Image (cartoon, helix red, strand yellow):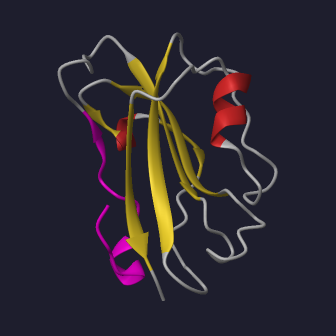
Amino acid sequence: GCEIKPSATVHRPNLQIAGRHFDDNKLFTLVMTDPDAPSPSEPNMREWLHWIVTDIPGAADASQGREIVPYMGPRPPIGIHRYVFVAFRQQDPMVMMMAPQVRHNFSTRAFAAQYGLGLPVAAVYFNAQK
């Protein structure tokens, strides 16, 4: 991962699900979290949920999906934080998916298990600090 200034991440990123295994006939879910909240030395709010988009068609931009949790840009209070994007292949459209009540203490692993998403098909991260 590279370092990106928080000021460059205020607006929702333009992310595309693309590649040899990501064709138009498949749907994907994208999750963005901060595993270092509120600080890397005491991440007791791990993971902080920044964004969930479901039903993203393969080879399409995330804006073509259904935003379940609105994008919240990084605002790291202390230290260097990692911001992680994880993509999952869906078996079916996510008709019944509900947004979590809170953003803190989110678990990408539990979320994937709850909705039968299996293992991630892609992941990337960047670092940011105040």
Regarding residue 112, the answer to whether it shows in the image is yes
Picture quadrant where residue 23 is located: top left
Name the spot of residue 88 as percent of width and height, x first: 47, 28
Region in magenta: 1-17
Name the spot of residue 73 as percent of width and height, x first: 50, 69
- Residue at 37%, 41% in the rendered image: 62
Residue projecting furthest to the right: 101
Quadrant location, the N terminus: bottom left
Q: Is residue 5 within the magenta segment?
A: yes
Which residue occupies the foreground of this view, 6 or 12? 6
Image label count: 0
- Residue at 52%, 24% in the rendered image: 119
Name the spot of residue 35 as percent of width and height, x first: 60, 60
Residue projecting furthest to the left: 20
Picture quadrant where residue 4 is located: bottom left
Give the overall secondary structure of the magenta segment.
loop
Q: Looking at the image, is 88 positioned above or below residue 33?
A: above
Q: Is residue 86 left or right of residue 39?
A: left
Regarding residue 10, the answer to whether it shows in the image is no
- Residue at 25%, 18% in the rendered image: 21
Q: Is residue 77 within the magenta segment?
A: no
Name the spot of residue 102 as percent of width and height, x first: 79, 56
Q: Is residue 64 left or right of residue 45?
A: left
Q: Is residue 79 left or right of residue 9?
A: right
